[in-house]
């Protein structure tokens, strides 16, 4: 069974159709890249998979481990193993990062009928992952993402990915707003999480990110559909020739 | 016509009550005269209504309609019920003073072994002895009808004196408990005087025995903080959801004094806390912060009046309201900077969070500045929980209620974190958590 199956998905936002019958199959262990010009519907796809309100699914379905994802609340999806790394992680003043991480982790575990992490185990795990991602301890004591740089925010997303151990990671434009050093640190963090049991969907406008997170499959999206799929060389081809040819094709 | 009728009915009901209460009200001579004058003032005004500017958003003729009869002196059964209610609200390491149905309950209180420099008497005994200055007993200005009513009817309370130079090692916890056997009203007043360079912590809790019927708390607090003295104060209104709580405070500060006060209202059906805080000496500082946590059809009104009468004083007000269902929160913050009060530094910020379409928040900041060399500012906002933040938390596995709870805690945390001591802050956090747990 595929981990994620998106079949003929049609999505509207305020009367405007954004996705017009998109299909995508992701198996565990695979890293897929979704590339496409601005407005092609890449972020909409990631939001609909995560369950963000404001999108109306008018047709098609999304199966996750064989279950109908569209019937689940965002928190149910999360505890089932769907993780969206946000393009713009939000700042939450007054909620300490540590409190947030522990509340989220325990909420997911509780939903799965698992025991809560003990405080020492939790702290040990957070510290270990934070050290690997170059996240200083004082950042964990501050409000969630408050005053973090772009790179720190993305590292905080990767930190959560490492803690929550999801089976599907969707990285929405992880490279936006990052300089090359910050990108490398974040990408190294992501690469460390690649595993035969986990799949990733990397959404990006630019080929650059794919130098660091090398995909197994590349899809090109245009006007709300996948118009071409291929191996990692497709990304290089796009870098050379641009998206214009696909916009015509769509 | 209807209004006149309502006023007369209220007045008559109270006359009967006063006549019945008669000898149950302590104090003779000048005290009895002062009661009579206060009562006349109340009768002239009647229950405050929307046409009284200070009470515009809290129309007691509509919300409360009538004043209930004076509560009976608690019997053994009432004291037992009160004792049970007290347990979950008992705080470690404090000197506890309990008022049950408006009467001091020695068996539930801790009056033995007073430390040097601390004096505690009940208001009833003080009035019966007739040796307290009239000016102190009747310090609150009776131009407010509910203060006048309280002055007329006060039956008991605590009179606490902290001598010059005494810094109390233990916080004082005054607990108001309604035993709630029958619908009734309790009228209490407590006086706290801190001498020069004294220090004290006062916690006030308002709670009810399980299954308490409708009741009314009419309370007042008169505080005088001497030069170089400091008072930390926390009040937690966790009355039953059938209750009315009308409380007033009058606080005056000497020179270089410090008053840090925090109030949280999560209980009662209708409540009003009105405080007048006056600077009488230079170089003093006040932080007055508060939180309303409301749902159902709760109505809570916090009305603060900061009187900067002298130069070089600072005041800070941070107020937060969280309102769900058809709850109604009122915050009125008035700051007056009198002509001589140069170098005043006064700031007020109030924010309301509406959790439902029918929730209502009224924020009324008022600054009246008559001095020219001052720093004053205020701000008020009202809004809903941020959808983007909620989605982020839900995408991380928190249910809708859990996500809301975390954001609500952060929102009220901005006011709670102004409480100076860790243990008092924990009290406020626990009260907020009880409210959050009850709504999920």
Image: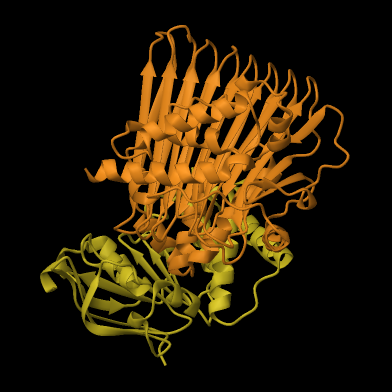
Chain colours: A yellow, B orange
For this view, does B132 lie left or right of residue B439? right
Is residue A203 found left or right of B340 in the rendered image?
left
In front: B166, or A153? B166
State whether residue A81 is above or below residue B54: below
Measuring from the top left, give residue B3's x and y in whole percent.
26, 43
Q: Is residue B9 above or below residue B159?
A: below
Q: Nearer the viewer, residue B245 or B70?
A: B70
Give the x, y percent position of residue B67: 45, 47
Q: Which of these two is toward me, A29 or B223?
A: B223
Report x, y in % for residue B1: 21, 43
Q: Quadrant of the N terminus of chain A?
A: bottom left
Q: Total label count?
A: 0
Q: Quadrant of the C terminus of chain A?
A: bottom left
The residue lying at 46 percent from left, 36 percent from top is: B146
Look at the picture and state if B59 lies above or below B342: below
Q: Quadrant of residue A205?
A: bottom left
Q: Give the left or right position of residue B394, taking residue A38 as reference.
A: right
Q: Residue furthest left?
A: A248
Residue at the spot x=48%, y=80% of the render? A80
Q: Residue at x 61, y 20 (%)?
A: B135
């Amino acid at each position: 069974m595929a981990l994620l199956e998106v079949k003929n998905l049609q999505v509207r936002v305020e009367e405007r159709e954004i996705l017009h019958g998109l299909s995508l199959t992701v198996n565990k262990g695979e890293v897929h890249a979704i590339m496409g010009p601005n407005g092609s519907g890449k972020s909409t796809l990631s939001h609909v998979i995560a369950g963000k309100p404001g999108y109306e699914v008018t047709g098609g379905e999304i199966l996750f481990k064989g279950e109908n994802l569209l019937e689940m609340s965002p928190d149910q999806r999360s505890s089932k193993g769907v993780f969206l790394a946000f393009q713009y992680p939000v700042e939450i003043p007054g909620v300490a990062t540590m409190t947030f991480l522990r509340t989220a982790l325990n909420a997911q575990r509780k939903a799965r009928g698992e025991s809560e992490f003990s405080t020492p185990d939790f702290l040990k795990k957070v510290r270990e992952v934070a050290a690997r991602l170059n996240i200083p301890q004082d950042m964990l004591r501050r409000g969630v993402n408050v005053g973090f740089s772009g790179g720190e925010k993305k590292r905080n997303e990767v930190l959560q990915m490492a803690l929550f151990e999801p089976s599907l990671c969707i990285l929405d434009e992880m490279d936006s707003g990052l300089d090359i050093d910050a990108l490398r640190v974040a990408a190294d963090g992501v690469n460390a999480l690649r595993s035969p049991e986990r799949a990733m969907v990397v959404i990006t406008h630019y080929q650059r990110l794919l130098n660091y997170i090398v995909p197994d499959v590349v899809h090109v999206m245009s006007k709300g559909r996948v118009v071409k799929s291929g191996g990692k060389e497709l990304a290089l081809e796009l870098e050379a020739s641009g998206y214009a040819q696909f916009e015509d094709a769509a | 016509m209807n209004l006149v009728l309502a006023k007369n009915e209220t007045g008559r009901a109270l006359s009967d009550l006063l006549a019945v209460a008669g000898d149950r009200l302590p104090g003779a001579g000048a005290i009895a005269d002062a009661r009579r004058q206060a009562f006349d003032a109340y009768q002239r005004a009647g229950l405050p209504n929307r046409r009284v500017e200070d009470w515009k958003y809290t129309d007691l003729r509509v919300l409360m309609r009538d004043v209930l009869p004076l509560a009976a002196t608690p019997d053994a059964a009432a004291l037992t019920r009160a004792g049970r209610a007290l347990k979950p609200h008992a705080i470690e390491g404090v000197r506890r003073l309990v008022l049950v149905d408006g009467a001091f309950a020695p068996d539930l209180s801790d009056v033995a072994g007073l430390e040097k420099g601390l004096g505690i008497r009940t208001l009833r005994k003080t009035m019966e002895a007739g040796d307290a200055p009239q000016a102190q007993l009747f310090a609150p200005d009776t131009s407010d009808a509910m203060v006048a009513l309280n002055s007329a009817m006060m039956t008991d309370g605590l009179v606490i004196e902290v001598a010059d130079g005494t810094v109390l090692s233990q916080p004082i916890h005054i607990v108001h408990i309604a035993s709630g056997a029958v619908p009734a009203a309790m009228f209490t007043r407590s006086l706290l005087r801190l001498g020069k360079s004294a220090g004290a912590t006062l916690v006030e809790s308002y709670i009810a025995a399980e299954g308490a019927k409708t009741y009314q708390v009419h309370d007042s607090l008169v505080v005088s903080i001497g030069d170089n003295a400091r008072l930390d104060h926390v009040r937690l209104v966790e009355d039953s959801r059938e209750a009315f709580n009308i409380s007033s405070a009058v606080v005056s500060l000497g020179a270089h004094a410090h008053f840090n006060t925090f109030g949280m209202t999560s209980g009662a059906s209708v409540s009003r806390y009105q405080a007048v805080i006056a600077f009488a000496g230079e170089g003093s500082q006040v932080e007055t912060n508060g939180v309303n946590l409301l749902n159902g059809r709760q109505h809570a009104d916090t009305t603060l009046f900061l009187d900067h009468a002298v130069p070089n004083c600072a005041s800070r007000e941070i107020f937060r309201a969280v309102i769900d269902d058809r709850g109604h929160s009122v915050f009125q913050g008035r700051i007056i900077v009198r002509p001589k009060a140069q170098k005043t530094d006064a700031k007020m910020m109030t924010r309301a969070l509406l959790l439902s379409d029918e929730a209502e928040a009224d924020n009324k900041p008022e600054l009246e500045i008559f001095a020219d060399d001052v720093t004053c500012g205020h701000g008020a906002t009202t809004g809903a929980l941020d959808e983007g933040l909620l989605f982020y938390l839900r995408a991380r596995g928190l249910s809708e209620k859990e996500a809301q709870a975390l954001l609500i805690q952060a929102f009220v945390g901005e006011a709670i974190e102004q409480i100076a001591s860790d243990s008092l802050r924990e009290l406020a956090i626990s009260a907020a958590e009880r409210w959050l747990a009850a709504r999920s």
